[in-house]
């Protein structure tokens, strides 16, 4: 089980990017999403995607992130451009415990030093600054050996097509 912990979410500034973090987590195989600041609008938007396109991850906002980290029983991975190389890190996580629940932490602006210390693995997706959305998608895809994309069953199903939009509604 993979859970995503989004810390530093500022509803006024990070609205779209946190939504994208959550949607990527859902579409790329995570089971739980935890966001530090309470944001009912984000929950509603996310749950409406689950409702229409199939039940993916669950979402909870307003979590106490220090408590989540402190009480986590499995492996803690933190995505940061300063961390160890992605492929090496994924291999190390699996070697440590292939069945462990993994908590993946992604930041918004500045991530406190205690997160780096609490993490079993600080992981970089390349050593350039970019985006938590890209970092998360790549981490999940590598973690799931390139098979992260989920085919969820919902009221609406998009059929891949080269022309037009093909959507089947139940
Ligand atoms: N300077 C900030 C910091 O303290 O890490 C960077 C903030 S960055 C816009 C937001 C988040 O994107 C980071 O907390 C990290 O989770 C993720 N991120 C950005 N670049 C990354 C990279 N190269 N590898 C892994 N994660 C990255």
Image (cartoon, rainbow, N blue to C red):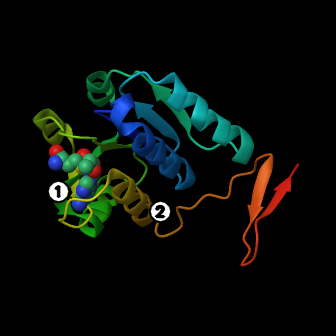
Task: Provide the secondary structure element on which disc 1 rests.
Answer: strand
Label pair 1/2, CB-CB below 8 angstroms: no
Q: Is residue 111 shown to the viewer in this render?
A: yes
Mark 1 sits near ligand 1, with its Cβ under 8 Å away: yes
Identify the image quadrant of residue 17. Answer: top left
Query: Counting other residues with Cα less than 10 Å from the Cα at mark 2, is it few (<14), some (14-19), or many (20 or more)?
Result: some
Identify the image quadrant of residue 48. Answer: top right
Q: Position of residue 161 (x, y in %)?
A: 74, 74
Q: Going 27% across and 65% down the picture, which residue do you hit?
A: 86
Asked if 45 appears above or below 78 in the picture, the reply is: above
First reached walking from the N terminus: tag 1 or tag 2: 1
Q: Position of residue 124 (x, y in %)?
A: 22, 60
Mark 2 sits near ligand 1, with its Cβ under 8 Å away: no
Name the residue beneath numbered marker 1. Answer: 83
Q: Is residue 65 left or right of residue 168?
A: left
Identify the image quadrant of residue 165. Answer: bottom right
Nearer the camera: disc 1 or disc 2 = 1
The answer to which of 76 and 137 lies nearer the viewer is 137
Q: Going 84% across and 57% down the picture, which residue do you hit?
A: 168
The answer to which of 130 and 125 lies nearer the viewer is 130
Q: CA distance from mark 1 to mark 2?
A: 20 Å
Asked if 136 appears above or below 35 in the picture, the reply is: below
Name the residue beneath numbered marker 2. Answer: 144
């Amino acid at each position: 089980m993979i859970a995503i912990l989004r810390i530093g979410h500022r509803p006024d500034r990070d609205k779209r990017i946190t939504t994208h973090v959550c949607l990527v987590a859902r579409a790329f195989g995570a089971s739980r999403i935890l966001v530090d600041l309470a944001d009912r609008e984000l929950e509603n938007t996310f749950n409406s995607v689950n409702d229409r396109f199939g039940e993916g991850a669950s979402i909870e906002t307003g979590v106490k992130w220090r408590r989540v980290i402190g009480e986590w029983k499995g492996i803690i991975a933190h995505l940061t451009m300063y961390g160890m190389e992605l492929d090496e890190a994924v291999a190390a996580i699996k070697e440590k415990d292939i069945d462990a629940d993994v908590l993946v932490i992604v930041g918004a602006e500045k991530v406190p030093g205690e997160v780096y210390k609490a993490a079993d693995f600080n992981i970089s997706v390349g050593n350039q600054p970019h985006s938590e959305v890209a970092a998360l998608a790549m981490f999940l895809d590598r973690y799931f050996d390139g098979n992260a994309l989920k085919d969820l069953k919902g009221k609406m199903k998009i059929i891949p097509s080269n022309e037009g939009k093909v959507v089947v509604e139940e």
